Amino acid sequence: MAIKLLKAIASSSFPVFLLGSVILRNLHIQTKSIAKSLMHNAIPGLGDKTGMKSIVITGSSRGIGYGLAEAFLQRGCQVTISGRSVANINKAVSRLQAKFGKSVVFGYPCDVSVPEQVQALWDESFQAFGKIDIWINNAGVNHPMKSLWELPAETVQSVIGTNLLGLTYCSQVAIKGMLEQGFGHLYNMEGHGSDGQILNGMAGYGASKSAVRYLTKALVRETQGTAVKVSTLSPGIVITKLIDDQFRENPDALERVKGAFNIFGDRVETVTPWLADRVLENDKSGAAIAWFTPQKAVWKLIRSVLNKRDLFALDNATDTYVGKLSSADIGS
């Protein structure tokens, strides 16, 4: 829905004064749908209540995954950093260990589309910390905004292999391990397509995230009555380098929608601490933890009239978007 709104905003024919009501209506429908489909299966948590939480986050060497890792570490957790690039993992682990200590940060390379590597990620993380309380399926890739038949086969394989098959393999391994240890909470990261919205040029990515919604609902039901819980995370519009993949072959299109991204988007450092708090507070299966709410959307629209932001300010040293906040962001 968020991407569809951005496209509409970029169009000169879209009446800006109606934007608030459109957002409210769409997000109200979306929130009701999530609540009906997931929360009716909620069960009380049976997890390990003692000691610090041990958390595995796939795709956490940068972006949202790295932000979540840092937020959990700030809250006294142990975290496993994972990703396909050994070099990126080493950099992320070094930065986090320098800040939080070596005893609470572990890194292990894993291509989630390879089942054997996923199992190894569980085994090595379990050996490092003695348990895994929370597993977050965050790893994901995007593709350029093109019609499905225009995408190379290897691009489609990468998107589906990571976003759907990889998440499925991770869910299998994590749930089996959690059943064996007697507790655990699995979180799946949602994205465009999870709510059924369709946008031209996003068929591959959207289909993968739509399937994630179905898979999560099924897992909530299949784990009902066990010690394992399954829920979803929805970060909203977060400005990361993943956006570059989407607009790689059409940078002019990115320039046209940057204004809308700056209104409704957020930095990693803004969203991930909030998500981490909600994850640590949550003790129910079937929870749908979503950052982007109707109230926040309307507030962002109102705030944009007086405060301008540039969320695409780039830190060349780390090659990440760090963003320049408005006075409203700083004061909130």
Image (cartoon, rainbow, N blue to C red):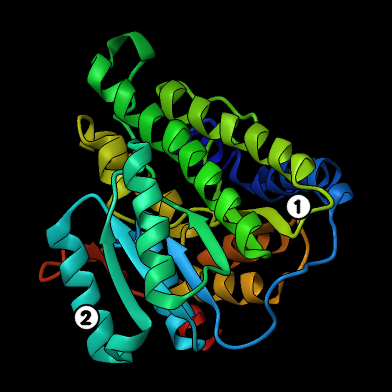
Tell me if residue 268 can be seen: no
Q: Mark 2 highlights which residue? A: 95
Tell me if residue 208 can be seen: yes
**219 versus 60 height, above or below:** above
Q: Position of residue 269 (x, y in %)?
A: 41, 74
Q: Quadrant of residue 327?
A: bottom left
Left or right of 194 on screen, residue 248: left
Q: Quadrant of the C terminus?
A: bottom right
Left or right of 89 on screen, residue 11: right
Q: Mark 1 highlights which residue? A: 286
Q: Position of residue 144 (x, y in %)?
A: 29, 29
Q: Amino acid at mark 1?
A: Gly
Q: Residue at x 65, y 86 (%)?
A: 50
**302 versus 148 height, above or below:** below
Q: Position of residue 325 (x, y in %)?
A: 38, 76
Q: Residues within 10 Å of mark 1 (few under 14, many from 20)?
A: many
Q: Quadrant of residue 318?
A: bottom left
**202 versus 102 height, above or below:** above
Left or right of 318 on screen, residue 83: right
In three-dimensional space, the C-alpha distance between marks 2 and 1, rounded to whole angstroms, equals 34 Å
